[in-house]
Image: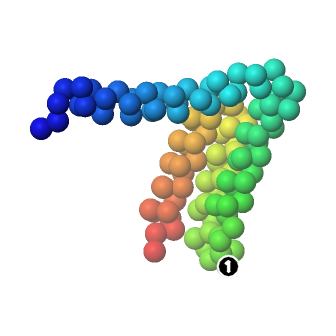
Amino acid sequence: MPDAPYAIAVVLIPAAVTWALRALPFAALTPLRNSATVQYLSTRMPAGVMVILLAYCLRDLPLTHASTLAPLIALTATAGLHLWRRNALLSILGGTAVHVILTSTVFAR
């Protein structure tokens, strides 16, 4: 059985490394907070990420099947809810609910 100082070192060294690795991004980003580039990206990136996710999710959607309507209707419901209420949680939950209901009832195989 290892002695006490060795066991303490085995716990403290990984804890210090973990703490340092988690603190490093915050320390590196502090000088960038006032950067014009970072402020520009913080306003433009959310919409860009959503467009990329939309393209990724719809890229293999077969347009010749009737079941294709379920994701498109859910997408329309999500966009409509978001434009109406401007609430991301409501939009996500509402669009998901519409898609699940349509795929499990109307477009069930």
Q: Is residue 80 above or below residue 101?
A: above
Instruction: Quadrant for residue 88, please give it.
Output: top right
Residue ID for mark 1: 64
| Residue 77 percent location from the top left of the image | 64, 48
SS at circle 1: loop
Horizontal side of residue 48 vs 92, given as left or right = right
- Between 76 and 92, the one lying in front of the other is 92
Residue at left offset 51%, top offset 28%:
20
| Residue 81 percent location from the top left of the image | 66, 39
The crowd level at tag 1 (other Cα within 10 Å; few <14, some 14-19, many 20+) is few
Q: Is residue 105 above or below residue 41?
A: below
The image quadrant where one finds the N terminus is top left
Horizontal side of residue 109 vs 51, given as left or right = left
User: Residue at the bottom extreme?
Assistant: 64
- Between 54 and 78, the one lying in front of the other is 54
- Between 46 and 54, the one lying in front of the other is 46
Q: Is residue 91 above or below residue 87?
A: below
- Between 52 and 77, the one lying in front of the other is 52
| Residue 6 percent location from the top left of the image | 25, 31
Amino acid at the residue labelled 1: Thr
Q: Is residue 40 visible?
A: no
